[in-house]
Image (tube, rainbow, N blue to C red):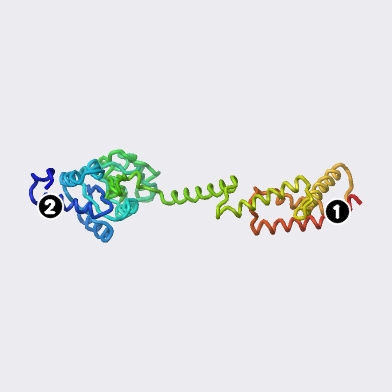
């Protein structure tokens, strides 16, 4: 027997050995706080965890003996075994265990001397109380109670205790009468040892929705970086080629390079510039014929859609929009001839 336990009674030695076996036979061991949990709820928690985790209640001194005998990094759990502690054994990872333990918690009334886990807020609105001493009791703790319609009513929402503050007896009594149960009661994971690392609640409490959103954002940013930096991957190669094609087309149009795939765009651009000249001339008293006016109206209506989007691979909707604009340009060609004979 190890030196740590040679002086212990037999039953305590057996407890230490049981704790050591639990640690050695499971991937994770955690220290949980049992303070304030009614016996009935402890039994319910055990039933909820059956098949997933085992709760081992033991004295802190015996937990300390077992951890010291095992030695190594697991012995650091001794720093978290304070108050009414117990051990929990499981093969789940610490994040899943933390989430499961949070689900076992229930709301209970506050007791004098307890610390508020969050801001305790009394909502505004009617209560079930008839006029009486309750009004004065609520007002004494800062709750704006009034009598309205034969009932006691809370005039406005009131924060009676801020997070981290101690709940005094008067406030505890008032909250109890109002049916407000601010205390989360259940197994509180103090720390978990998993694969050589100690995990504390601040590391395990994760907003899963925010985490998923961050992953999605990172994936989108990585996609954009790959496309803009021209780093081809199996996922981004299509967008990179599409962007390159679009940029090449834009250069061809701007430089008036007469290539078969863009000559129609060059002509269309020339037509729009011609119509702009025609409208400018009209504003200075130049009369336009009917065909030119119709072409100019069509070009003006299509102008918002003609603003070039960021260079990316075109979707089916964008291709349809481009075809529509090309049709409008072709319908306006008659105006070009009409203006210049």
Q: Nearer the viewer, residue 336 or 162?
A: 336
Residue at the (14%, 51%) spot, across then down: 15
Q: Secondary structure at mark 2?
A: helix
Badge 1 is on which residue?
335
Looking at the rendered structure, the number of numbered marks drawn on it comes to 2
- Report the side of 105 relative to 10 (left or right): right
Q: What label sits on residue 26 in the rendered view? A: none
Q: Earlier in the sequence, mark 2 or mark 1?
A: 2
Q: What label sits on residue 14 in the rendered view? A: 2
Residue at the (78%, 48%) spot, across then down: 257
Q: Nearer the viewer, residue 75 or 163?
A: 75
In x, y percent, where is residue 83? 20, 43
Dot 2 crowding, Cα within 10 Å, few <14, some 14–19, many 20+ = some
Dot 1 crowding, Cα within 10 Å, few <14, some 14–19, many 20+ = many
Residue that protrudes farthest toward the right in the picture: 341
Mark pair 2, 1: CA separation? 101 Å
Q: Quadrant of residue 78?
A: top left
In x, y percent, where is residue 261? 75, 55
- Report the side of 53 relative to 147 (left or right): left
- Report the side of 160 relative to 13 (left or right): right
In x, y percent, where is residue 163? 33, 40
In x, y percent, where is residue 218? 50, 47
In this rendering, the label closer to the viewer, 2 or 1: 2
Q: Nearer the viewer, residue 25 or 88?
A: 25
Residue at the (77%, 50%) spot, across then down: 300
- Report the side of 296 relative to 114 (left or right): right
Labels 2 and 1 touching (C-beta < 8 A): no
Q: Secondary structure at mark 1?
A: helix
């Amino acid at each position: 027997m190890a030196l740590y336990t040679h002086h212990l009674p037999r039953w305590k030695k057996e407890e230490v050995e049981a704790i050591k076996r639990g640690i050695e036979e499971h991937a994770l061991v955690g220290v949980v706080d049992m303070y304030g949990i009614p016996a009935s709820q402890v039994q319910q928690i055990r039933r909820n965890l059956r098949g997933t985790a085992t709760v081992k209640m033991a004295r802190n001194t015996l937990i300390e003996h077992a951890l010291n005998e095992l030695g190594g990094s697991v012995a650091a759990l001794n720093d978290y075994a304070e108050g009414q502690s117990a051990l929990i054994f499981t093969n789940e990872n610490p994040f899943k265990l933390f989430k499961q333990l949070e689900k076992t918690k229930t709301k209970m009334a506050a007791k004098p001397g307890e610390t508020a886990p969050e801001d305790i807020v009394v909502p505004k609105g009617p209560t079930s109380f008839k006029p009486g001493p309750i009004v004065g009791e609520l007002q004494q703790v800062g709750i704006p109670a009034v009598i309205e319609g034969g009932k006691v009513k809370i005039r406005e929402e009131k924060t009676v205790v801020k997070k981290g503050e101690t709940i005094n007896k008067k406030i505890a009594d008032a909250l109890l009468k109002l049916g407000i149960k601010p205390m989360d009661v259940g197994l509180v994971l103090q720390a978990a040892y998993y694969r050589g690392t100690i995990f504390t609640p601040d590391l395990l409490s994760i907003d899963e929705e925010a985490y998923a959103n961050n992953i999605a954002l990172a994936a989108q940013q990585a996609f954009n970086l790959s496309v803009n930096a021209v780093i081809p991957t199996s996922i981004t190669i299509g967008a990179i080629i599409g962007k390159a094609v679009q940029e090449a087309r834009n250069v061809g149009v701007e430089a008036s390079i007469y290539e078969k795939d863009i000559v129609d765009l060059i002509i269309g651009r020339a037509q729009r510039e011609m119509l702009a000249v025609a409208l400018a001339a009209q504003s200075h008293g130049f009369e336009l014929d009917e065909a030119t006016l119709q072409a100019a109206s069509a070009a003006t209506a299509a102008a918002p859609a003609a603003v070039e989007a960021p260079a990316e691979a075109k979707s089916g909707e964008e291709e349809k929009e481009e075809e529509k604009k090309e049709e409008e340009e072709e319908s306006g060609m008659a105006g070009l001839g009409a203006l210049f004979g």
